[in-house]
Image (spheres, helix red, strand yellow):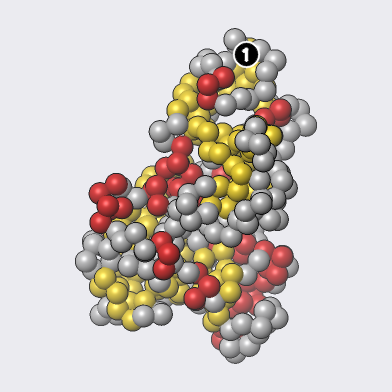
Amino acid sequence: MPTPDRAIQSIPAYPADQFQVEIGANMGDSLGVLDELMLDDIYQLCPTAYAKRLALASSADGSFHVAQDTELGMIGAQLHLDCALTLMPQSGDNIEALVMVEVDQEGLIAAIYLVPMAPMDLQQSYTLVRAERDSARRKLAQMACVSFTRGTRITMATGAQKPIEDLRPGDRILTRDEGVQELRWIGQTTSRAVGRMAPVLIRAGVLNNAADLLVSPDHRLLVYQRHDELGTGCPELLVRARDLVNGDSVVVQDGGFVDYFQLLFDRHHIVYAEGIAAESLFLDSLTQPALPVEILDRISPSLGERQRRDAHGIDVQKALLDRPDAVNLLKRASLR
């Protein structure tokens, strides 16, 4: 069985049997694959439905598998990204979702999962208004991309700070690991700030940041420990923003829309955002579809092979941060 060891993401998902047609051509059926879906069918979550964690790993060849630390699926089983859906609730904004299929060793369907990109309501009915394959890979990539938000100030080669929306390819930016580097590409997407796409706000001063820092939930910040407060045995830590959320100094900023920006260099770097160290876009088989085709065509095929997050420190698991004083510990560790 293949070992999933690259580009691991943890996404909330519902087993297909928890999302069934209540009115329509497929009435009574559970969510199926694209060829079985009928537009205008009306779905509803079962009264006992709740999203579980589907750990997704992308291999170098672009294939997907169920990763370790998952609540759904069999570890190591192959996953197929089937299609993207648009669901219209009785009230409120449309919800985008993905359909993922787990297959067994014989290539037969073992399970189907609904992966919503925004929270869903047990009391709502959802009409299927669109189902397509073309956009599925790009939408998954956008969920996986680490992004800064409009207004974030990035430190330039001169030491000046510049709003990220004013950056252009060719700009020279200060990196922590390799000094001044040239920006190759800057991406921009606008998303509803809900669910997996809701940014995380790190208030000014919390991690010694000069101003509020708003980033995508999976964005990793680099914390240099002068004293090993967390007991990791490593001075350099990469910490996901979402794992720092404490409802006070670090919060999810849910609601409305958010402009996300992605910074791409010749390889993965640590830049300075609002004065603290944060990662640039990590390019791999999972995130590549978020880039325009003309950019991918100019990128060396080996670029993805040269992307290594562990070159900057250890990736801290949520279990080590599951304590009310975790943020204060990290700040203290960086100062002592």
Image quadrant assignment for residue 264: bottom left
Position in image of residue 50 (x %, y %): 72, 38
Image quadrant assignment for residue 139: top left
Image quadrant assignment for residue 6: bottom right
**Which residue is at 29% across, 59% downward?**
299
Position in image of residue 315 (x %, y %): 59, 69
Q: Relative to 218, say whether 266 is above or below.
A: below
User: Which one is in front, 106 or 28?
Assistant: 106
Q: Relative to 247, say whether 289 is above or below.
A: above
Report the residue marked by disc 1. Answer: 26
Number of marks in the rendered image: 1
Mark 1, Cα crowd under 10 Å, few <14 / some 14-19 / many 20+, is some
Relative to 86, is 181 on the left or the right?
left
Give the secondary structure at mark 1. loop
Relative to 248, is 97 on the left or the right?
left
Query: What is the quadrant of the C terminus in the image?
Result: bottom right
User: Which one is in front, 331 or 42?
Assistant: 42
Could you tell me the amino acid type at mark 1?
Answer: Asn
Position in image of residue 83 (x %, y %): 50, 32
- Asked if residue 252 shows in the view, the reply is no
**Which residue is at 55% across, 80% downward?**
236
